[in-house]
Amino acid sequence: MFAWDDEENRLVAEHHPFTMPKLDEFEKYADSDPLKIRAQCYDLVINGYEMASGSIRVHRKDLQNKIFELIGLSEKEINEKFGFLIEAFKYGPPPHGGAAIGFDRLIAIMAGEDSIKEVIAFPKTASGSDPMTEAPSAVSEKQLKELKIKLDL
């Protein structure tokens, strides 16, 4: 569930902080040895390639708050970054989970490529721009007005 990050000197979520922990281990080790807690997550690996990844998700407010605290988020940070999620837990989300297929990895393997960069339909650059569509592009005043956005540069 967790790993220790020496650079940040804190616990970090190994999969992601919304992954459901094994509850018996969480109750036993959360306050004493959180590195012993395992997560309810899974990967599909074929011939050494990760083809899919997923997890069961946290669906309890108390549990999610404790996980956020364990990875070093303050109450203020939790509310600023994830207040919408914590609020949603009031309505009782059901237990849920899922998995995502690494479709680009599958296509790269089928095409005999070593890198997914060779088969990604809409590649991005390190700057986050898209050379094919030239995004991000300039935004017109009309679009800004429509979205009620004011640029104050």
Image (cartoon, rainbow, N blue to C red):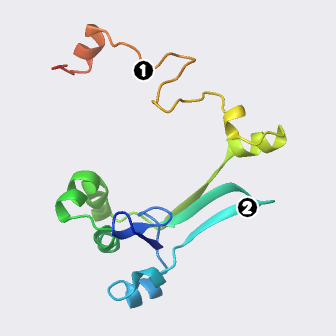
The CA span between labels 2 and 1 is 35 Å
Q: Which residue is mark 1?
A: 136
Residue located at (66% from left, 55% from top): 52
Q: Is residue 109 left or right of residue 97?
A: right
- Judge whether residue 131 can be spotted in this image: yes
Q: Amino acid at mark 2?
A: Val
Q: What residue do we see at 32% from left, 73% from top?
A: 70
Left or right placement of residue 48 versus residue 24 in this view: right
Q: Residue furthest front?
A: 7
In this picture, residue 117 sits left or right of residue 150? right
Residue 59 visible, this orientation? no
Quadrant of the snapshot with the C terminus: top left
Quadrant housing residue 45: bottom right
Q: Where is 148 relative to 48, above or below? A: above
Earlier-in-chain disc, 2 versus 1: 2
Assign a secondary structure to mark 2. strand
Which residue sits at x=65%, y=63%?
A: 43
Task: Report the residue marked by disc 2.
Answer: 45
What x and y, as percent, mark residue 93? 39, 63
Circle 1 crowding by C-alpha within 10 Å: few under 14, some 14–19, many from 20: few
Closer to the camera in the image, 119 or 80: 119
Instruction: Tell which of 148 and 67 is nearer to you.
Output: 67
Q: Say which element carries label 1.
A: loop
Q: Position of residue 118 (x, y in %)?
A: 71, 32
Residue 108 higher or lower than 7, as above or below: above
The kind of residue tagged 1 is: Pro
Task: Return the x and y of residue 1 as percentages of the image width and height.
Answer: 48, 73
**What residue appears at the point 24 percent right and 55 percent down from the top-left corner?**
83
Marks 2 & 1, CB-CB < 8 Å contact: no
